[in-house]
């Protein structure tokens, strides 16, 4: 039996997580029999690691490490790619059996029926756009888009018709809905979908190498990791983008092999086979972390993720998952120590508080920080009928100005 992932407050409303001069990491060993393929965090901040033998989890506060396999509802193993949707839910791609979703309330996995007649072995990639679309890529160059994560995904056949794609490694988009620029990365180059106009980017043009193994769209800039450097395409001024290239020869990158990319606020995190590099978008400076100048367990960074509160997690090839030891902000620690007791959790259409909270003010936030409900506690029962299923943060402020909170799940 797996331990239920903790429902303590996750500090979802924290300011940006920042690096300090300590250069010290806290690391957790994942006892997988194979390798870590991807990492992600849910709306609460718990860590998920897709691996050869299933999906592993690390509780944000409890630090309990558990493994979920086919006996826990995963339709198949290995697990390849992970994604967090806009409600904080986690999805995983699995070998031969497609997409799976994690039910935090039931503490298990289940297959997602996409209604596709599969002409491929497995989804190599899953991600979610800013407006809730689900992107799915396969090992043989097919791309599917599921609008608002509902209905049957539609294959974008014109992508592979324009340029033969290899295994899909990343799909992301700009924020200018309803016509975002979609970037598809593969082991055989890049496809740009600019308002329906499909443009291939390969080594015959500006791309340093056709093998593009990682990517991240941030502030309308596409950061694309190849085995020969970091390619950038800036769409902030519209299309066509202005392009650039970071390599060992013209920057502080520790290696030209870019294996993982993430970004938060004014920082871009670049995982290489020779350490972690952080690019500051404020002054264009670089900071490099490796086993020589820190206790990063390995220089071979294979995956990165940033939680909704800005907490960076790093997976390395020794199957360690690490984070900076100052990753808990002051408010996050306070919320951990002073959590509200509420039940049931997961909840139906109401949550119940102790009567000592009567006349206090309360707020309920979504995982993206959006205020969903607020008011005064006039009775122990608080109606949450209007909330959709997902994870939420409950914050309460007493008449003395004391604030505490807890994370809860709406069924």
Image (cartoon, grey):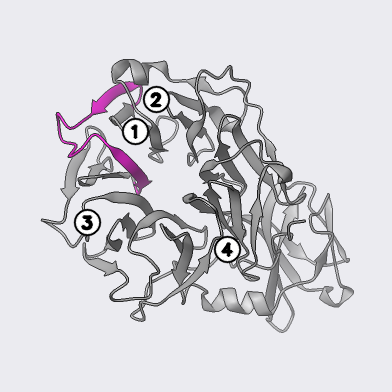
* Extreme residue toward the bottom, this view: 400
* Alpha-carbon span between mark 3 and mark 4: 34 Å
Q: Quadrant of residue 115?
A: top right
Q: Are marks 2 and 1 in contact (CB under 8 Å)?
A: yes
Q: Residue furthest left?
A: 249
The label on residue 255 is 3
- Residue position marked by numbered label 1 in the rendering: 186
Magenta extent:
194-219
**In 3D space, how far apart are the residues under numbered discs 2 and 1 (Cα atoms)?**
7 Å
Q: Secondary structure at mark 4?
A: loop
Image coords of residue 11 (percent x, y): 59, 68
- Other-residue count near label 2 (Cα within 10 Å), few / some / many at <14 / 14–19 / ≥20: many
Label 3: state its secondary structure: loop
Say if mark 4 contacts mark 1, CB within 8 Å. Answer: no
Give the Cα separation between the discs numbered 4 and 1: 33 Å
Q: Nearer the viewer, residue 329 or 208?
A: 208
Which residue was labeled with disc 4?
12
Secondary structure beneath dot 2 equals loop
């Amino acid at each position: 039996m797996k331990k239920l992932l903790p429902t303590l407050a996750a500090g979802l409303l924290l300011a940006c997580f920042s690096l300090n001069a300590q250069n010290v990491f806290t690391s957790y060993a994942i006892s997988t029999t194979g390798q870590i393929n991807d990492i992600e965090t849910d709306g609460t901040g718990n860590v998920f690691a897709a691996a050869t033998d299933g999906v592993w989890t690390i509780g944000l506060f409890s630090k309990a490490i558990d493994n979920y396999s086919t006996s826990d509802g995963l339709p198949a193993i290995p697990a390849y790619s992970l994604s967090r949707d806009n409600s904080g839910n986690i999805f995983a791609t699995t070998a031969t059996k497609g997409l799976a979703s994690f039910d935090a309330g039931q503490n298990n996995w289940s297959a997602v029926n996409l209604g596709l007649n599969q002409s491929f072995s497995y989804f190599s990639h899953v991600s979610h756009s800013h407006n809730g679309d689900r992107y799915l890529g396969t090992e043989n160059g097919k791309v599917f888009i599921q609008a608002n994560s509902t209905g049957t995904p539609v294959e974008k056949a014109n992508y592979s018709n324009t340029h033969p794609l290899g295994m899909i490694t990343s799909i992301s988009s700009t924020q200018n809905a309803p016509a975002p620029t979609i970037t598809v990365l593969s082991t055989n180059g890049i496809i740009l979908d600019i308002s329906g106009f499909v443009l291939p980017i390969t080594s015959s043009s500006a791309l340093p190498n056709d093998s593009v193994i990682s990517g991240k769209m941030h502030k309308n800039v596409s950061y694309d990791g190849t085995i020969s450097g970091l390619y950038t395409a800036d769409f902030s001024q519209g299309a066509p983008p202005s392009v650039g290239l970071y390599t060992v020869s013209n920057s502080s990158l520790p290696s030209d092999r870019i294996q993982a990319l993430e970004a938060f606020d004014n920082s871009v995190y670049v995982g290489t086979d020779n350490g972690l590099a952080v690019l500051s978008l404020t002054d264009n400076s670089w900071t490099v972390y490796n086993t020589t100048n820190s206790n990063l367990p390995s220089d071979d960074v294979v995956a990165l993720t940033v939680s909704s509160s800005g907490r960076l997690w790093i997976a390395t090839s020794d199957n360690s998952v690490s984070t900076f030891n100052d990753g808990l902000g002051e408010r996050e620690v306070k919320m951990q120590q002073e959590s509200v007791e509420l039940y049931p959790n997961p909840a139906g259409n109401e949550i119940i508080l102790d009567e000592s909270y009567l006349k206090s003010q309360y707020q309920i936030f979504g995982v993206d920080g959006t205020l969903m409900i607020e008011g005064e506690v006039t009775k122990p029962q608080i109606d949450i009928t209007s909330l959709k299923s997902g994870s939420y943060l409950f914050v309460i402020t007493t008449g003395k100005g004391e604030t505490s909170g807890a994370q809860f799940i709406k069924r």
